[in-house]
Amino acid sequence: MKALLKLLRCEFSKLKRKPLFFAAAAISALIPLCCALFLPEMQDFASGAEAVDRLMSTLFQLSAYLLLMPAVVVLASNLLFEEQDNDTLKNLMTIPVSKPALALAKMTLLFLFSIAFMAIGGLVNLGIVLASGLEPAGFWRLFFVGIGQGILMWAGALPCVLLVVLLNRSYIISVIITFFYTVINYILGTNDFFITQPFGFNPGTLLPGPLAFRWFFQYLDTSGAQMTKLMERISPYFVTTPQAFLVVVLESAVFLTLIALVYKRQSC
């Protein structure tokens, strides 16, 4: 554990040379800002609670799916192979540094990045609500739901990170597959067949798109006839926080183990 913490500290120290990380975290504000500035329905709020709900819903349903998951995989490609690219991995192995521990430190950094991504997006939404002169009622509850959404998206990206390691720096192919994986999860996350499955060993539970939707949607405002009908149809299939994070823990344990093993077997 001490060695892992030292490696994580080293990874943090490298971030000052990686503006890509800071740029990727900053894009979490992109979709909420665009919606607030350019969509009329996002500019006329009846109350602060409605403003918070709409803006955070945008963060959950667009930024987390379409921006965070691909960002995690792209940054993983950069992190996992920077030592090979700079021809410094052999030097690290003579210290010695365990390759599985090195891989896990990098994945932990991406875990923290995912949390920061959603936190930045949430705080930008808070700024938009306050700038509108409204009281941000219910913000902090949804803010922490957003943090959980970031963790779910990090775990959901791990299969693609494993693919990056297996392909051994085939960045273009990895990014293409990640793009399709992201789009598919986004589509399945709103598909009735996948979001109306019971909790268990099925795609509606194991895939990050449907699982995240079945968890965070219960925290959003459901007033209005259309939303009421939707809630009546899908609420029996919502997953609790313990259920959602049980799946996250189990899946991340499996994929982190595979990532570490594959990374260890690759030559320096």
Image (cartoon, rainbow, N blue to C red):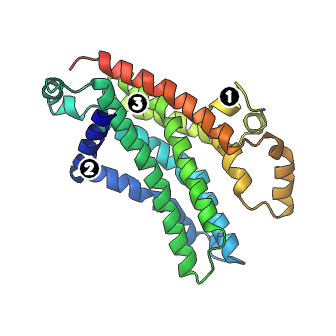
Q: Which residue was labeled with disc 1?
A: 203
Most distant residue in the bottom direction: 133
23 vs 268, left or right, is: right
**Residue in view at x 44 percent, y 23 percent:** 257
Image coordinates of residue 231 in percent, x first then y, are: 82, 51
- Quarter of the image containing the C terminus? top left
Q: Counting residues from the N terminus, which is met first, the one under dot 3 or under dot 2?
A: 2
Image coordinates of residue 267 in percent, x first then y, are: 23, 17
Q: Secondary structure at mark 2?
A: helix
Q: What amino acid type should be assigned to the residue bearing mark 1?
A: Pro
The crowding category of the residue bearing disc 2, from other C-alpha atoms within 10 Å (few below 14, some 14 to 19, many at least 20), is: few
**59 to 139, vertically: above or below:** above
Q: What amino acid type should be assigned to the residue bearing mark 3?
A: Ser
Q: Quadrant of residue 36?
A: bottom right
Along the line of sight, the residue nearer the viewer: 182 or 131: 131
Q: Is residue 3 visible?
A: yes
Q: Secondary structure at mark 3?
A: helix
Q: CA distance from mark 1 to mark 2?
A: 36 Å
Q: What amino acid type should be assigned to the residue bearing mark 2?
A: Leu
7 vs 249, left or right, is: left
Callout 3–callout 2 Cβ contact below 8 Å: no
Q: Counting residues from the N terminus, which is met first, the one under dot 1 or under dot 2?
A: 2
Q: Which residue was labeled with disc 3?
A: 174
